[in-house]
Amino acid sequence: MSRLSSNVRRARPLLGTLVEIRLPREAAGAIEEGFEALERVHRLMSRQDSESDVSRINAASAGNVIAIDPWTMAVLQRAKEIHALTDGLFHWEQLEMLDSAVHVKQRVRLTLDGIAKGYAVDRAVDALRRAGADCGAVNAGGDLRVFGKQPEPIYVRHPRSPGKLVHIGQVAEAAVASSGAYFSAAEFFDPRTGKVVKPGYGITVIALDCTTADALTKPCLLEPNRSSVIAARFGALAVVMQ
Amino acid sequence: MALWPAFVAAPVAIFAPAAHAAVYLSVEQAQQAVFPGARFTQEALALPDAPDRKLWRVSEGGWFIVDAVFGKHELITYAVGLGADGSVRGVEILEYLESYGYQIRDAAWRRQFAGKTARDPLKLDQDIRNISGATLSCRHLTDGIKRLLGFYESALKQR
């Protein structure tokens, strides 16, 4: 497999999972730039780190204005759009967005766990490209994006038997994210009803960017019969795997 | 499918690899990634509770530690570089091995991976790229890194 030996792969624990970057050997010098982008998103959006933008927003009392990083602002804006375009299936906290700050009108429990990993993958791909890599892949614990002209095979874990891999096809210049009850009887919160859902199936979303793919998995998981319609609003594809 | 000329759907093929493994870095490569240009002197450790742990003193001060953590289905070998003040200089994954059998805790089964490097690919199904839907938590790994920081405080700081 000459293709394998011509690649460099590195992995680090970030964003609550293992993040892998794969690049052609001649572009290996760009890897550090990719990890720097991932680490920046991790620092800004982690709920564990009390200095992160997300923690500072959650610690704010009603009426406070919290200055945030442009990257956090971009994620919040995208989250709000996706909330509106999925009829509320994507969770959103009532925050008023100012130029480079948010106005916390009432105390919130913000989490960007359903979108930040995908956003981090997108920023890493940008950074890798800027550093001279013309193809490669970034995979943040199953939320992945491939870039470059060469189509890449995509495997999805079988939702009820994660040791089995399903080859769903090939993509070029696309992002793939999946959600489901993989390793345990995972529970998902439906923001419209406040009820807990335990799906017996998995959802895979293929989109042009990983922010969108990551964020759409949950709305599609909550409404599997409408998942193709929801995904189509974003130019994405949704696959339900029983 | 008109929207997605780039997506080529395959006839769905399901298979269960015997093990899915990735070798990222050798110990030497990880040492140079965390402490470029430094020299490393291995020090003996006899820790019955941590048989996989290995320790090096770094020429410019600090320590380089390799250890392994087990999840239910995965084995992760990783390296942590600590500066002279005990702060984390870098964390690198050396190997990731995943299996849904019970073999992963079996030392004899694991020996087939010993000594492999990133340039010497395994003959298992390890070149399965682009797996979506993992969501393996790295909690074992973050717990392991915390244990190494405790090990530094209790055993290395005074050395």
Image (cartoon, rainbow, N blue to C red):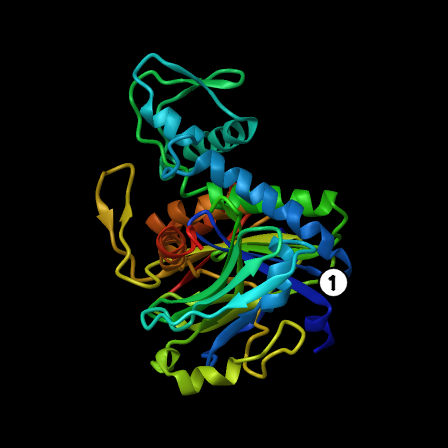
* Image spot of residue A46 (x, y percent): 42, 38
Residue type marked 1: Arg
Q: Residue furthest front?
A: B159
Asked whether residue B91 appears in the rendered view, the answer is yes
Residue A114 screen position, x and y as percent: 41, 43
Q: How many marks?
A: 1
- In the rendered image, the residue lying farthest to the left is A195
Label 1, secondary structure: give it: helix
Residue in view at x 55 percent, y 70 percent: B22
Q: Which quadrant does the N terminus of chain B fall into?
A: bottom right
Q: Residue furthest top?
A: A63
Vertical comparison of A62 with B71: above or below: above
Question: Is A134 left or right of A221, judged from the image as shown?
Answer: right
Does the image show residue A209?
no
**In-image side of A117 versus B50 (left or right):** right
Side (left or right) of B78 relative to B71: right
Side of A143 where A136 appears, left or right: right
Residue at position x 61%, y 74% in the image? B117
Quarter of the image with the C terminus of chain B in it: bottom left
Percent across and percent down for residue B65 are 49, 61
Whole-percent x, y for residue B99 in the image: 41, 76
The residue under label 1 is: A25
Observer-nearest of A225 and A126: A126
* Residue B121 location, quadrant: bottom right
Residue at 33% from the left image edge and 73% from the top image edge: B48
